[in-house]
Image (cartoon, rainbow, N blue to C red):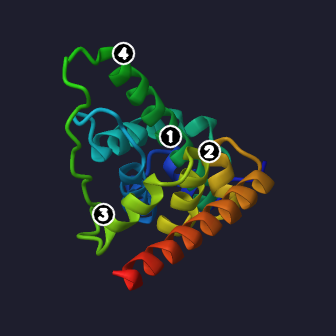
Amino acid sequence: MSADDAVVRRAKLGDPEAWRELYRAHAGRLVVWLGTRPSGDSAVASEDLAAEAWLIAAQKIRDFSGTADEFAGWLFGIARNLSVNARRRSVRRVTSPVASPPESEPTLGPEGAVAGLHWVIDRLSDLPPRERDVVACLEVVGLDVEGTAKALGMTAVAVRVARHRGLRRLRRTSAEGSEDARVR
């Protein structure tokens, strides 16, 4: 593995300024990305999962080795595991006789209102889960291929393939949508 850079070294020593720097670099993207993932539970907000991911990262920072950029993949991996666990818990807890729970509005990240976020979430929800997660990491929150691979527990090659397939599906559905609009 690569050696720790200065920010990670300082964060391991508990330097609050290093944590602020990591937080500023990754917090907004993490909340937006978690907002694109289906939670299955309207009581679990993306902000809550992100906060829990940061707490776990702070507890386990000594186990991490790498740069501040590689920290993003590690942090997103923690958040993905928390998201999956939250989804599993919500499926086990469903006791309502209602056919399907009411859909909740996704929350926006701390960097403010993101124009078109609802449109992006709708388009991503049409993709298979693997492609949706890869496209969300790469195109929505701006992780690199290696960070995405680490965050999703995939190889870099699998990430590139899923990205290609996901973007091709999105282009196809966008083209079909424009054709339908012209016919009307």
Mark seen at residue 80 = 1
Question: Which residue shows up at 54% across the image and 51% down it?
Answer: 133
- Viewer-side residue, 87 vs 62: 87
Badge 1 element: helix
Labelled pair 3, 2 in contact (Cβ < 8 Å): no
Report, in whole angstroms, how far the alpha carbon at label 3 lies from the one at label 2.
23 Å
**Horizontal side of residue 61 vs 88, given as left or right:** right
Q: Amino acid at mark 1?
A: Arg
Classify residue 144 by image quadrant.
bottom right
The image shows residue 179 at horizontal and vertical percentages of: 47, 80
* Residue that label 4 marks: 92
Tell me if residue 11 can be seen: yes
Q: Amino acid at mark 2?
A: Leu
In the displayed structure, would residue 11 be above or below residue 85?
A: below
Report, in whole angstroms, how far the alpha carbon at label 1 lies from the one at label 4.
19 Å
Report, in whole angstroms, how far the alpha carbon at label 4 lies from the one at label 2.
23 Å
**Horizontal side of residue 114 vs 58, given as left or right:** left
Q: Residues within 10 Å of mark 3 (few under 14, many from 20)?
A: some
* Residue that label 3 marks: 118
* Residue that label 2 marks: 152
Mark seen at residue 129 = none
Labelled pair 4, 2 in contact (Cβ < 8 Å): no
**Horizontal side of residue 142 vs 147, given as left or right:** left
Q: Residues within 10 Å of mark 2 (few under 14, many from 20)?
A: many
The image shows residue 77 at horizontal and vertical percentages of: 56, 42
In the displayed structure, would residue 90 be above or below residue 167?
A: above
Labelled pair 1, 2 in contact (Cβ < 8 Å): yes
Sequence-earlier tag: 1 or 4: 1
